[in-house]
Amino acid sequence: MGLDFSHTEAQWAYSGFSRFRRALAHHEGIDLDVMHGFEWYGDDRPRVSWDDVTTPLKPLLNHSDCDGELTPEECRQVAPRLREVVNAVWPEDCHDRASGLALADGMDAAAKANEPLEFC
């Protein structure tokens, strides 16, 4: 069982997608463990608001990892930066690189069709 998306063949195990997003966030200078919405039982550290986050990846980073959707406009915003970070972080023979680039392509396809990219 894992995470799939509309408009693309990109897929991850839930744990793999979590690691993927954490690596994206780390590259953008964000520690997801202290962000609102990423609380863990027993972790009483102060939470950081998403209001001051400016990376174009924000809609992908601050999103449920198992359902929901990104709007066509969010897809247009995220896809170019996603490609840049994926190409900078992962080697060519890595699953996360291939799936990350496929996810960006799916975002482009969803935006072009003026449809949301669904997490399923």
Image (spheres, rainbow, N blue to C red):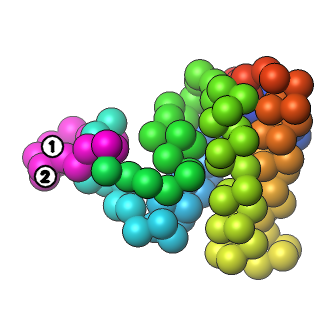
Residue 76 on image: x %, y %:
72, 41
Task: Judge whether residue 81 is colored magenta.
Answer: no
- Tell me whether the residue at label 1 lies in contact with that at label 2, contact meaning CB atoms closer than 8 angstroms: no
Which residues lie in the magenta part? 38-51
Q: Distance between the residues labelled 1 and 2?
A: 9 Å
Q: Is mark 2 on a helix, strand or loop?
A: loop
Quarter of the figure with residue 29 = bottom left
Quarter of the figure with residue 67 = top right
Q: In this view, does 8 lie to the left or right of 76?
A: right
Quickly name the residue at label 1.
42
Q: Is mark 1 on a helix, strand or loop?
A: loop
Q: Which residue is drawn at 65% across and 67% down?
A: 85
Q: In this view, does 116 lie to the left or right of 61?
A: right
Task: Judge whether residue 45 is colored magenta.
Answer: yes
> In this view of the protein, can residue 96 be seen by the observer?
no
Residue 112 on image: x %, y %:
87, 32
Quickly name the residue at label 2.
45
Residue 6 on image: x %, y %:
81, 27
Q: Which residue is drawn at 83% across and 41% down?
A: 108
Residue 83 on image: x %, y %:
75, 61
Q: In this view, does 101 lie to the left or right of 48?
A: right
Disc 2 marks a residue whose amino acid type is Arg
**Closer to viewer: mark 1 or mark 2:** 2
Q: Identify whether 46 is placed above or below 92.
A: above
- Name the chief secondary structure element in magenta: loop
Q: Residue at x 81, y 23 (%)?
A: 114
Disc 1 marks a residue whose amino acid type is Gly
Q: Identify whether 119 is placed above or below 25.
A: above
Residue 73's label in the rendered image is: none
Q: In which quarter of the image is the C terminus?
A: top right
